[in-house]
Image: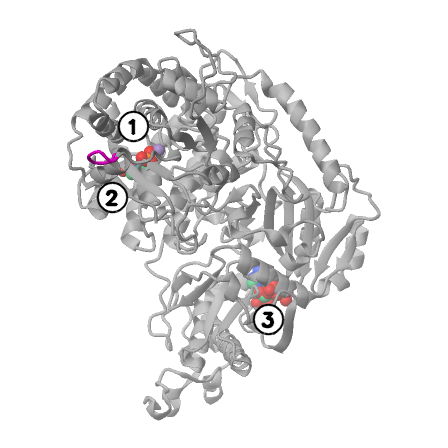
Amino acid sequence: MEGNNDNNNTREKEIKEEKEMGSSSNSMMHRSSSRPQLDLTGAAIQGNFEERNPTILLPNQSDDISHLALDIGGSLIKLVYFSRHEDNPADDKRKRSIKKRLGISNGNRRSYPILGGRLHFVKFETRKLNECLDFISTKQLHVGGIDSPSYSSRLLTDENAIIKATGGGAHKFADVFKERLGVSIDKEDEMDCLVAGANFLLKAIRHEAFTHMEGQKEFVQIDHNDMFPYLLVNIGSGVSMMKVDGDGQFERVSGTNVGGGTYWGLGRLLTNCKSFDELLELSQRGDNKNVDMLVGDIYGGLDYSKIGLSASTIASSFGRTISESKELSDYRPEDISLSLLRMISYNIGQISYLNALRYGLKRIFFGGFFIRGHAYTMDTISFAVQFWSKGQAQAMFLRHEGFLCALGAFMSYEKHGLDDLMAHQLVERFPMGAPCVDGKIHGPPLVDLNEKISWMEKFMQKGTEITAPVPMAPPPGTTGVGGFERPFSMGGTLRSDSSASLNIGVLHLVPTLDVFPLLADPKMYEPNTIDLADRSELEYWFTVLSEHLPDLVDKAVASEGGTDDAKRRGAAFARAFSAHLRRLMEEPAAYGKLGLANLLEMREECLREFQFVDAYFSIKQRENEASLAVLSDLLMELDSMKEDARLLALIEGVLAANIFDWGSRACVDLYHKGTIIEIYRMSRKKMHRPWQVDDFDAFSKRMLGSGNEKPQPHKRALLFVDNSGADIVLGMLPLARELLRRGTEVVLVANSLPALNDVTAMELPEIVAEAAKHCDILRKAAEAGGLLVDAMVNIQDGSVENTASVPLMVVENGCGSPCIDFRQVSSELAAAAKDADLIILEGMGRALHTNYNAHFKCDALKLAMVKNQRLAEKLVKGNIYDCVCRYEPSR
Ligand SMILES: Nc1ncnc2c1ncn2[C@@H]1O[C@H](COP(=O)(O)OP(=O)(O)O)[C@@H](O)[C@H]1O
Ligand SMILES: CC(C)(COP(=O)(O)O)[C@@H](O)C(=O)NCCC(=O)O
Ligand SMILES: [Mn+2]
């Protein structure tokens, strides 16, 4: 019933939206169901309509909250809340026609009342319960739960409002919640929640678990079919150890009262620290040999090698203090904190190992906020497990370490469908978070754009004092612990203690994402070609992206009319993106496994966060127009050639036109030296075979055959197009036309959202319609593919007969990035792929930075010009402007 209600509301809204937006031909005024989501409903031009680049206001970009779950622990309160991001994509005509053609319907999907939104993670200290209540109340998180028929119809005073909560505080503070917020707490069992949260994370988040040894973080891909049994050790105030055998199947096998509360409590008494982070930070400058009794202290500086103990092994934590007539004040707080941290971490590691041994478990996952993503704590625990198990058991940590119970409580809401989510339907984003100074949260997370901008401005004024979204210290060389038993002092300031430290982001739930069905081996697939775990690569790309930033800001600001507002947003964007870059330089694995594609996508996301709709909009339009003006000459020239020469000219054309890339420093410098057409001609002239990677002959043989043998044409080709202007108009469209002419259906696959000067799926129908004015093949195919239904084509020869023709279609890829990750594509692309037997990936982002080494179940052609000297040297042992034509027949 609820689902139906929801659908009706949705449809009504859609119709209303269509009415409001239907007459607009402005292709920017759309929103996409794909990731990343940008709510453009109600978008309105601000100021003068005659302006070339007017500012567009997005009034509905805020989040609409639907519900929340809590874990109220002895030390910390953890909140997981869901913001419903109304996701009723305005079905544009292209979408409707493609859905019809590919047989995609919404009807057969299970209805997910809460999907299509975002999960947020926030924590507060339990002793500051009031701050937490203020937060919930300010954001109205307690209003409108999942069981409510309409999210927004609930009133603050609703007597029946319920919040799921777990942890001791769910019992202890139930009355306070009723009193302050008028809500009842629905208590969930803590252990059930802990295990449910851990199982969900391990299944649904790709890079959730990682090992941490000697400062090195490595993500572990958990096989869903081989996940159980495992030992789950939750280090909160106290410690619980659970043997987990399956969903809902577990036993609490052990625990210890020496846990996070012990470290924080004892540490506070012994050092007078005012916060947990202060205590942890002290430990980083400590030397435990001043406090601990070492083997060497007992054995006169010697190892006890017979039983494998070196002189620096701790024989007795704090043992040294008994032999000295010193007072507490004679010891350095730094040394005390480190000894305490080591004592507790070793002890937990050791007990965990013993329990793993007891039940024959090889994998131990550690959660709880004691860990706090702290390198040294993790190294110590890992060392203990490794040492005692002689390498037989493995310690792993979880990125959402402290949120397991809260997530489990959240999952206990019925009917939300969350447990059915798959890894490919979750996208993690890292928006600028809560304002947080000195580890304290000051006010609610920043969702309002203005708030975010002033926060970024304030950050500029106060430098490192404000710690929310930025690294606190210059990047240290390593987190290294070196020789383990006698650790180095661990330099570097601890990052601020809140979700604002951006270690975990916001989880977008996007049920319309799918794994690309033509991947040869989805489990083995890794999109990135360049591994940024290699420090020199990271530093190189960091420099490239940093140097490109001023120019990008100029373009973005100009694209929105150059107003003061745009300038402010531009500056805030630059600060935010630089902060992300610096953060990642400091800790490359901070946001999960990092590849170049993630950095390039993050830049686009960051632009969107500061509401830059399409930074290259006018450049794209200008280049489209210039290229369309010479298209008919090019088509005539091509038509005068023989089939084999034409195929070569077409591929050359694609490679030559790929030079129009506003993301490449070298290319942008070139554009000052001539007009688009001059540069295009120059680029074509330089197309000498053999190219640096040259499988053209094999491709040509598959297409044209050899001798008398004429191969079957491909049934359907997916063309992953790249840039606007010459690239699409003079490169990919003529190639598409050739395939159509040979009887192959063509699907142009383009971005869902803008990224640099890439052409988007929304823009393509208009470009195709313009091109179709010059070409019968394109016109008929576009008509057959439903692309010209309402494009106002002024057909030159006047014939509009509906002859049977293979169709030309357009689908969106689900991305807003210059690269493509085939584990997460739009469902319409996945549907289009079902009948495809050829894919053509074009451009550096899609064919080189990502997917260069990817294998597919069908024939694959990868075409790109290498527009970066370093990449050319590394990847193809060549030089900038060399070309790649890589052909791999189906596997
Ligand atoms: N900001 C913080 N304030 C207090 N304790 C913290 C903080 N950050 C990490 N901790 C550590 O985390 C422990 C609490 O972990 P958590 O998983 O939240 O357990 P609980 O549910 O028992 O509160 C504390 O005892 C302390 O060791
Ligand atoms: C962002 C890009 C991958 C886009 O290239 P495309 O996919 O359009 O061919 C590329 O411009 C790039 O890698 N640029 C950074 C390197 C440089 O400026 O040299
Ligand atoms: Mn591009």
The amino acid pointed to by label 1 is Phe
Picture coordinates of residue 640, whole percent (x, y): 22, 17
User: Mark on residue 245?
Assistant: 3
The amino acid pointed to by label 2 is Leu
Drawn side of residue 6 relative to residue 598, left or right:
right
What secondary structure is found at the residue carrying circle 1? loop
145 or 112, nearer to the observer:
112
User: Mark on residue 871?
Assistant: 2
Residue 44 location, quadrant:
top right
Q: Is 370 situated above or below 765?
A: below
Q: Which residues are magenta?
A: 705-709
The amino acid pointed to by label 3 is Asp
What secondary structure is found at the residue carrying circle 2? helix
Residue 278 appears in the picture as rendered: no
As for residue 706 lying within the magenta part, the answer is yes
- Marks 2/1: CA–CA distance: 17 Å
491 or 223, nearer to the observer:
223
The reply to whether the C-beta atoms of the residues labelled 1 and 3 are less than 8 Å apart is no
Tell which circle, 3 or 2, labels the residue nearer the N-terminal end. Answer: 3
Colour mapping: one colour
- Neighbours of disc 2 within 10 Å: few (<14), some (14-19), many (20+): some
The reply to whether the C-beta atoms of the residues labelled 3 and 2 are less than 8 Å apart is no
